[in-house]
Image (cartoon, helix red, strand yellow):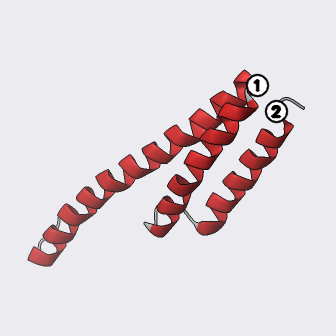
């Protein structure tokens, strides 16, 4: 257990940041699942719209430090490739 005042404060801050980051990651995953669901349904229009909505969420995760830039880029690239194949 923490003995110093600053260490106790750090524990409180870490817990708070952890909750915020969990909610951000959850929100990003929800947007990605919407894209996957649209791809699975075979609706290219819905998939394209869902992808355009997911992109800013991914980039927001990068800017907030929740995701690495390359991870977000990889996810966007793979989803874009999947959307292109829908209905083809």
Please name the residue that numbered disc 2 is placed on.
Answer: 86
Q: What residue is rendered at 37% in x and 47% in y?
A: 23
Q: Does residue 79 appear to the left or right of 25 in the view shown?
A: right
In this picture, residue 44 sits left or right of residue 18: right
Q: Label 2 near label 1: C-beta < 8 Å?
A: yes
Tell me the element at label 2.
Answer: loop
Where is the C terminus found, in terms of image quarters? top right
Relative to residue 85, is residue 83 drawn left or right?
A: left
* 3, 39: nearer the viewer: 39
Residue 55 disc label:
none
Residue at (54% x, 56% y) in the render: 56
The residue positioned 50% from the left and 38% from the top of the image is 30
Residue at the image position 48 percent from the left and 60 percent from the top:
61
x and y, in percent, of residue 16 in the image: 24, 57
N-term mark: 1 or 2: 1
* Residue at the extreme top: 41
Residue 47 picture location, percent across and down: 68, 35
Classify mark 1: residues with Cα within 10 Å, few (<14), some (14-19) or many (20+). some
Depth check: 82 or 11 in front?
Answer: 82
Query: SS class of the residue under badge 1?
Result: loop
Question: Quick one: 3 or 69, which is closer to the camera?
Answer: 69
Quadrant of the drawing holding the N terminus: bottom left
Q: Give the percent coordinates (x, y) of residue 10.
A: 21, 70
**Local crowd at mark 2 within 10 Å, few (<14), some, or many (≥20)?**
some
**Residue designated by label 1:** 42
């Amino acid at each position: 257990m923490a003995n110093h005042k600053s260490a106790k404060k750090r524990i409180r801050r870490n817990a708070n940041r952890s909750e915020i980051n969990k909610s951000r990651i959850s929100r990003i995953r929800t947007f990605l699942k919407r894209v996957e669901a649209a791809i699975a349904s075979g609706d290219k229009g819905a998939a394209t719209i869902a992808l355009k909505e997911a992109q800013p969420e991914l980039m927001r995760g990068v800017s907030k430090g929740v995701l690495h830039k390359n991870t977000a880029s990889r996810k966007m690239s793979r989803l874009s490739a999947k959307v292109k194949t829908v209905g083809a």
